[in-house]
Image (cartoon, rainbow, N blue to C red):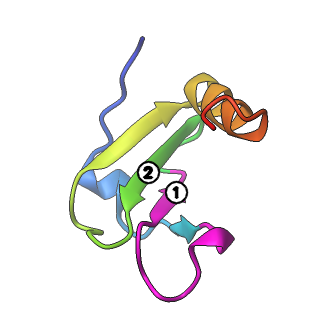
Amino acid sequence: MTTHRAAGSELAGRRWIKSSYSGTGGGNCVEVACPTTGYRAVRDSKNPTGPTLIFSHAQWTTFTTGIHTGKFD
């Protein structure tokens, strides 16, 4: 597996998207952004300055496909 470390400047000013399933009351939410072409960044919405996970396009596709097919249920 290849890893990509996003510099703080890559994440600054990016639009973070929270799942519509998260609601408005807080709780266990994640946010996703696109720091660079081909990557997705994921963070905890309660801790926006905390750690960020970076996924390649292939890793993100595999993960989201698994979600949609019920692999993690």
2 up-or-down from 19: above or below: above
As drawn, the residue found furthest toward the right would be 69
Quarter of the picture holding the C terminus? top right
Q: Which residue is mark 2?
A: 42
Rendering coords of residue 26 (x, y %): 42, 81
Question: Residue type at mark 2?
Answer: Val
Quarter of the picture holding the N terminus? top left
Residue at (36, 29) in percent of width and height: 4
Dividing the picture into quarters, in which one does residue 3 lie?
Answer: top left
> Label 1 vs label 2: CA separation?
5 Å
The kind of secondary structure element at disc 1 is strand
CB under 8 Å between callouts 1 and 2? Answer: yes
Q: Which residue is mark 1?
A: 32
Rendering coords of residue 33 (x, y %): 52, 57
Rendering coords of residue 21 (x, y %): 65, 70
Looking at the picture, tell me which residue is in the foreground, 18 or 24: 24
69 up-or-down from 29: above or below: above
As drawn, the residue found furthest toward the bottom would be 25
Rendering coords of residue 10 (x, y %): 37, 52
Badge 1: residue crowd in 10 Å (few <14, some 14–19, many ≥20): many
Residue at (30, 34) in percent of width and height: 5
Residue at (76, 40) in percent of width and height: 68
